[in-house]
Amino acid sequence: MPLISFGDPRFQIDMLLGFLDDIDNLENSRSKEITETYEKWSAENEKVKAENEEYYDWKVDSFNNDLFVVSELKRTLLNGISVTLNTVLERHIISILRQYYKKSKTTLESRKTYTASDLKKELEKSKHQNISIISDDLVQRIDRYQEIRNIIVHKEGLFGEQKQHVKLFIERNSKLFDIDIANEKIDVQRAYIEKVSVDFKQFFNLILYTDKGEPIHII
């Protein structure tokens, strides 16, 4: 019986990647529209600043607030995609484990979040044909991505109370995040999502397919 039983995770990952250009285009078009509207208003209301400075400042703040909302929406959407990528990962990990556990008559723990490390241990025990090339570095990175997901979902991006290995991961991969150092808060960047996607697809390629692209069957 093929290990893949919940649809092809690579296809699902690629679907999510397809939204990245849409998000960039949305930000660019809305920011451009707001800026052009402000420039037009400013040119048509040169006397307003001298006659009613308070109103002028309020109007400028309104335009700046609109630009801020657009950037915050982009942050929210990117964080959301990163969380959804982890949902894809975790569903497939559970789906694969369920097949192995069914064979060994082991019960999945309903409240446990299974990690890439949990899956690798089961693959080692079951003598998966690609286990020797599923690297510890890859599995460890994926475990970190799952921890980043929890920070975003449960801590609103605040990482100050996280374990040292998580902080170190963020520090070493700072180019993948928008980091508010003062508040110890992160949001993910597009580059983070792209990196996660590459690693997830590599992980599933090794677990679900042979080097010829054929489905791997449970032994």
Image (cartoon, rainbow, N blue to C red):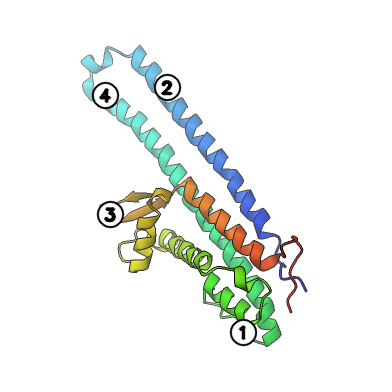
Q: Residues within 10 Å of mark 1 (few under 14, many from 20)?
A: few
Closer to us: 177 or 158? 177
Q: CA distance from mark 4 to mark 1?
A: 66 Å
Name the amino acid type tagged 1. Thr
Q: Quadrant of residue 157?
A: bottom left
For marks 3 and 2, give the one nearer the viewer.
3
**In the rendered image of this protein, does residue 98 appear above or below residue 203?**
below
For marks 4 and 3, give the one nearer the viewer.
3
Q: Residues within 10 Å of mark 2 (few under 14, many from 20)?
A: few
In primary-sequence order, the first of circles 4 and 2 is 2
In the displayed structure, does residue 201 sit left or right of residue 164? right
Which of the numbered marks, if any, corresponds to residue 107?
1
Q: Which residue is mark 2?
A: 37
For marks 1 and 2, give the one nearer the viewer.
1
Name the amino acid type tagged 2. Thr
In primary-sequence order, the first of circles 1 and 3 is 1
Name the amino acid type tagged 4. Tyr
Q: Which residue is mark 4?
A: 55
Tell me the SS state at disc 1.
loop
In the displayed structure, does residue 151 sit left or right of residue 46? right
The residue shown at (43%, 21%) is 36
In primary-sequence order, the first of circles 3 and 2 is 2
Q: Which residue is mark 3?
A: 183
